[in-house]
Amino acid sequence: MIEKPRPSLIAQRPSDIEHRTSVLESDFAADVRRDLALAPKQLQSKYLYDALGSSLFEAICRLPWYRITRAERALLNRHAREIVARLQAPRLSSGQGDESSMPLIVELGCGSGEKIVILAEALQAAGGHARVHLIDISSQALEQSERSLGRLDHISVVGHRETYEVGLRQAALARDGDQPMLVLLLGSNIGNFDMPAAHEFLCAIRGALAPGDALLLGADLVKPETELQLAYDDPLGVTAAFNRNLLVRINRELGGTFDLDAFAHAAVWNPAFNRVEMHLESRADQRVTIARASVSVDFAKGERIWTESSYKYEPQQIEEMGLAAGFVTREQWIDESARFALTLFTAES
Ligand code: AVI
């Protein structure tokens, strides 16, 4: 039996962490300045996830009207054994803990970590070991996932507080010999990329994999507009708070003067693109200054800031997206009631 390494949150030295954090902050100011000058005005959805934003997103996942998380968890519980069995079963069953036979599982956007725990438990039950790399821009999400995985034997954890692209590159570099790799892109996180960016991202994932490695993709499906409206503009106002918290964050971190009462949450289904858009709509003509982004921005009454897109797919479209990036579908499991799909791809040579 190998000794379980102490999980570390960031695979970097402390001085590097400080450096990376300040770089992330200056990126934030530059992105805000640039994106509020666009027409229509925009803010990137990755900035929704500060500590409070991550907690609000966790709360969204518990709302009765937002079904993605529960549907995906149910599919994972039902199929975890099949998924881990595909991680090169003969090598896993040796149970030797040999480094090169130990699968590398990389989760892009780990959230609270509960989904990867389902797979890690199934792997452990099958007598396997795994090295897990968690990639998230939220340190709170990384800490929570680390805690969730920390109680499992035979699982070592490395966290990367990075964007998906950078974290994936770092995780792939840590690969040992012909160690099999499984990348998890769950929770319909792919849906927050526009179509060209989603294709580019799937190609980047494929580029980090070797033939036979796997990608497990969770993606939300097209469903009636009334259900989507409730999921993205819930009666409790949690999603509205999640969206408006971005303005709270800009005020706090960049010295902004956003008046929260002067912006309303709006969720709009755009059928031409099969996406739900989140916006913040100005309730009045107003000027906002953001000191640390060196910018003043004028808003007309009714003008919107576009903060997020959540694309919804047809099952076949998900398979085609994988194919276009160099994957083949091994399985696709669908929750017909919540209209959510989990697709297992393998990388082709
Ligand atoms: C993280 N992501 C997949 C969520 C979604 O459904 O697009 C974020 C979210 N936005 C509003 N509610 C949830």
Image: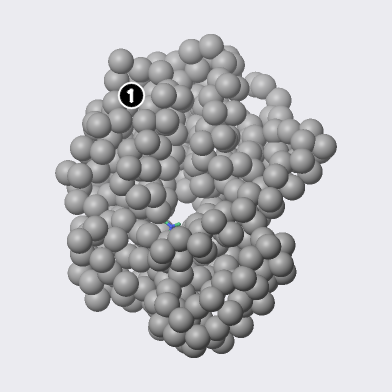
| Relative height, residue 274 to residue 296 (above, below) | above
Image label count: 1
For image coordinates 24% across by 43% down, the residue present is 318
For disc 1, the neighbor class at 10 Å (few under 14, some 14 to 19, many from 20) is: many
| Relative height, residue 28 to residue 252 (above, below) | above
Instruction: Single out the residue that lies furthest toward the right.
Output: 15
Residue 24 visible in the snapshot: yes
For image coordinates 33% across by 24% down, the residue present is 347
User: Is residue 283 found left or right of 198 in the rendered image?
Assistant: right
Of 340 and 79, which appears nearest the observer? Answer: 340
For image coordinates 36% across by 59% down, the residue present is 310
User: Is residue 97 found left or right of 326 in the rendered image?
Assistant: right
x and y percentages locating residue 122 in the rendered image = 45, 38
Instruction: Single out the residue that lies furthest toward the left.
Output: 316
For image coordinates 26% across by 38% down, the residue present is 321
x and y percentages locating residue 196 in the rendered image = 32, 42
Of 330 and 139, which appears nearest the observer? Answer: 139
| Image quarter where ligand 1 lies | bottom left
Q: Amino acid at mark 1?
A: Ala
**Residue at the disc numbered 1:** 347
Quadrant containing the C terminus in the rendered view: top left
User: Which image quarter: residue 251?
Assistant: bottom right
Quadrant containing the N terminus in the rendered view: top right
Of 333 and 1, which appears nearest the observer? Answer: 333
Q: How is the image coloured?
A: one colour
x and y percentages locating residue 284 in the rendered image = 49, 88
| Relative height, residue 14 to residue 128 (above, below) | below
User: Is residue 151 found left or right of 269 in the rendered image?
Assistant: right
